[in-house]
Image (spheres, rainbow, N blue to C red):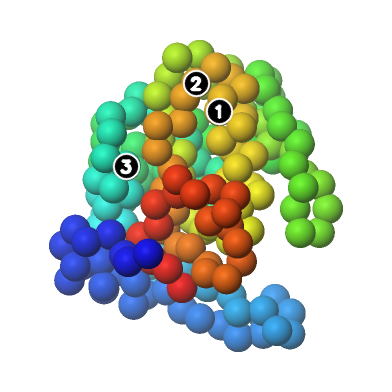
């Protein structure tokens, strides 16, 4: 999948800020560090605008998956003029309304959402990365469990070769690495 085509000069610049760190956090892992992208205001604006534009549909709210997904969801919500709802790990919300358990590569986890995600809302679901797809799929299931509808799914990066696309085929990625 090619990067989102809007304003290719600024998109290419934002992509160039993602650092590759080999053997982190352990031997054999290639880590994609978005810290330089987050530190650059123009790059963040470009990414937020592209995430909203590539949704291609109208939505009522942006939901971001913990934790780096919050950053991009908040920026995208500001660009779109909507609210942002965090999808959190278990135990982080004072009054979770819904929760879903899911399998990860190294065990099980639980995501929760607050009652601010209401039935009937149209949701743009965002995260920083699509790797194996488990967390993003659980986020989508949680939105649906709340009676809301995921109208578009977007990520900043898709790590190819990890089969995440098989779990979340509707995901739109800005950068494929």
Position of residue 155 relative to residue 2, above or below, is above
Which of the 4 image quarters holds residue 39? Answer: bottom left
- At a point 28% along the width and 29% down the height, the residue shown is 58
Residue closest to the eye, 172 or 63: 172
Circle 3 residues within 10 Å: few <14, some 14–19, many ≥20: some
Residue carrying label 1: 143
User: Could you tell me residue 55's position as x and y percent?
Assistant: 32, 42
User: Could you tell me residue 90's position as x and y percent?
Assistant: 74, 36
Q: Is residue 76 left or right of residue 70?
A: left
The numbered disc on residue 148 is 2
Circle 1 residues within 10 Å: few <14, some 14–19, many ≥20: many
* Residue 94 visible: yes
Q: Disc 2 or 3, which lies upstream in sequence?
A: 3
Position of residue 26 relative to residue 114, above or below, is below
Residue carrying label 3: 55
Q: Disc 1 or 3, which lies upstream in sequence?
A: 3
Which of the 4 image quarters holds residue 157? Answer: bottom left
In this view, the residue farthest toward the top is 119
Which of the 4 image quarters holds residue 17? Answer: bottom left
Q: Is residue 156 left or right of residue 44?
A: right
Circle 2 residues within 10 Å: few <14, some 14–19, many ≥20: some
Q: Disc 2 or 1, which lies upstream in sequence?
A: 1
């Amino acid at each position: 999948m090619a990067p989102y085509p809007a304003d290719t000069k600024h998109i290419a610049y934002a992509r160039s800020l993602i650092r590759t760190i080999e053997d982190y956090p352990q031997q054999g892992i290639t880590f994609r560090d978005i810290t330089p992208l987050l530190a650059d205001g123009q790059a963040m604006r470009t990414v937020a605008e592209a995430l909203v534009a590539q949704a291609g549909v109208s939505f009522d709210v942006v939901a971001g998956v913990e934790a780096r997904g919050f950053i991009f969801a908040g920026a995208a919500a500001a660009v779109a003029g909507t609210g942002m709802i965090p999808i959190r790990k278990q135990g982080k919300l004072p009054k979770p309304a819904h929760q879903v358990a899911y399998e990860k590569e190294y065990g099980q986890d639980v995501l929760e959402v607050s009652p601010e995600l209401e039935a009937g809302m149209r949701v743009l679901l965002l995260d920083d990365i699509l790797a194996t797809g488990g967390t993003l799929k659980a986020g989508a299931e949680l939105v649906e469990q709340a009676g809301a509808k995921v109208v578009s799914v977007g990520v900043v990066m898709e790590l190819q070769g990890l089969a995440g696309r098989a779990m979340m085929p509707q995901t739109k990625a800005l950068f494929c690495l």
